[in-house]
Every structure is written in C-alpha cells, then in structure tokens.
C-alpha cells in the first residue's frame, strides 16, 4: 500500500512541479510492436511539460491502452519470491532459480491493459526527438484461456485469465501487464511524427487454481518479451 500511495503522489505532483513552465504539449500516440510470437497494439494520450532554457527536455504523464497478443507461448512462474528467492529491491541482484520456475502453455493469449504512464523525452532539433515511457499503474481484462500447466514430465489442464491489477514495482516484483518503450521520432509534418524503437512488455495470467505447488502454491505466470515497435505521434500543441 505504501508503494501504491507513493506512485499516486508522484503522478499528482508532476503538474505542480511544472506549473511555472511556459510551454506544455499534448500528444496522441499510436504504436505497433512485433516480435516472435508476441504483438502489441497501443494508443496513448499524454501531457508533457518542457524544461530548460531551450525547453528541449520533456517530462510527461498520460493514459495508455494496450492490447497484448501472444501465440503458442509458454508463460513462466511470475512472483519474485519464487523466481529470485525473495521479493523487494534485493531481488534485482539475485539470479533466477530455475528449479522454482514452472510454466503454463497458452495456445493464444489476449490481454487488454489500461494504464497510467510516465514519460521523459528530449528534442535534439526541430525534426528529431527521443524518449522513454513506462506504464505505472492500471488494470487488465480479457477472456479466460485454456492452457496446460507443465512441471517437468507432469502436466494438467488449467484455465487462465489476465491478472487484474497492474503495478510497476521493478523487475520480477511487477504485478500484471505493463508496457515500456524506448523510441526515436522524426517529424514529417508540422504536427505529425513517425517513430521506431523497442518495447519491453509484461504479460501476466492468473490460473483459476494454484496449479504450481512447489516450493509454494502459485497461480501467477508471465512472459516479458522485448520487441521492435513503430508508430505515429500527433502533437496537438
């Protein structure tokens, strides 16, 4: 709860930090990501506040709708406590424990995720800019999917649904389905930009029963693909 309150406090203080800046902007962003057996479709609406003497640095916040797709994919044990042996910041510096990681095979997956995002960008010139954005908090939805839980030679049929709550906690500590993106963009018209970059995606399903029993019961399974992306940005101001 303290981490969640901290995230919400950060989101509410961005406008007050930037209130003395003379320039703000609003953008709409449409992006497609493709890689391996995963595809993403995302649309966002963002506000950005510009900083610095030449106002080339931009800090922003917004809302992003993600549609995350997978095909013939093995989702693996998600909780940091199992994957790394402990949760919290210390988990970032631990190696994964393969013996604790089982999988759920889903012939197809489709997750809708509506998240609040934070962004940072820099304009190198009137034509070129680069940026990074990341989902922070939100919720997911989608249809139940039939799948197969696998632990070595043992398997059983399961039903999986998108994990409902999304929260950025860093690495294996994250909850739910989140999207982050590095990109470079080029302005082709006054308000229209084209972009290309890389997305790192978390897609998480929860099984209807705790199919994994060792080293402790678990029902959360995820994939974390890194895929190429491209899209368009429309700057409204």
Image (cartoon, rainbow, N blue to C red):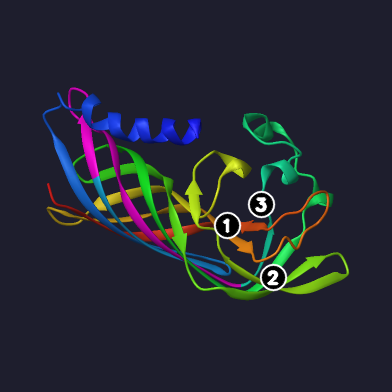
Q: Earlier in the sequence, mark 2 or mark 3?
A: 3
The residue at which mark 2 appears reads as: 105
The residue at which mark 1 appears reads as: 225
- Where is 192 relative to 207, above or below? above
- Point out the residue furthest to the right here: 153
| Residue 52 highlighted magenta (yes or no) | yes
Q: Can residue 51 be seen at all in this image of the molecule?
A: no
| Measured Cα–Cα span from mark 1 to mark 3 | 14 Å
Question: Is disc 3 surrounded by few (<14), some (14 to 19) or many (20+) residues within 10 Å?
Answer: many
Q: Earlier in the sequence, mark 1 or mark 3?
A: 3
Which stretch is magenta?
A: 47-71
Is the C-beta separation of discs 2 and 3 under 8 Å?
no
- Name the residue: 79% across, 73% down: 156
- Name the residue: 15% across, 26% down: 21
> In x, y percent, where is residue 40?
45, 64
Q: Can residue 155 be seen at all in this image of the molecule?
A: yes
Q: Is residue 133 left or right of residue 108?
A: left
Q: Which mark is residue 78?
A: 3
Question: Is disc 2 surrounded by few (<14), some (14 to 19) or many (20+) residues within 10 Å?
Answer: many
């Amino acid at each position: 709860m303290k981490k969640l309150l901290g995230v919400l406090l950060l989101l509410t203080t961005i406008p007050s930090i930037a209130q003395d800046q003379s320039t703000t902007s609003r953008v709409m962003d449409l992006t497609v990501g493709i890689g391996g057996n995963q595809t993403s479709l995302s649309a966002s609406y963002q506000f950005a506040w510009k900083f610095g003497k030449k106002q080339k640095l931009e800090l922003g916040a917004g809302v992003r709708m993600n549609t995350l797709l997978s095909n013939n994919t093995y989702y693996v044990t998600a909780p940091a406590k199992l994957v790394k042996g402990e949760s919290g910041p210390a988990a970032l510096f631990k190696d994964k424990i393969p013996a604790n990681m089982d999988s759920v095979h889903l012939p197809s997956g489709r997750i809708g995720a509506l998240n609040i995002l934070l962004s940072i960008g820099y304009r190198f010139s009137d034509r070129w800019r680069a940026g990074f954005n990341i989902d922070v908090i939100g919720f997911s939805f989608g249809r139940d999917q039939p799948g197969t839980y696998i632990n070595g030679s043992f398997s059983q049929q399961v039903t999986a649904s998108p994990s409902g709550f999304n929260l950025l906690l860093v690495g294996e500590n994250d909850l739910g389905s989140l999207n982050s993106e590095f990109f470079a963009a080029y302005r082709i018209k006054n308000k229209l930009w084209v972009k290309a970059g890389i997305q790192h995606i978390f897609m998480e399903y929860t099984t209807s029963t705790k199919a994994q029993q060792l080293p402790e019961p678990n029902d959360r399974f995820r994939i974390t693909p890194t895929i190429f992306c491209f899209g368009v940005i429309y700057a409204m101001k």
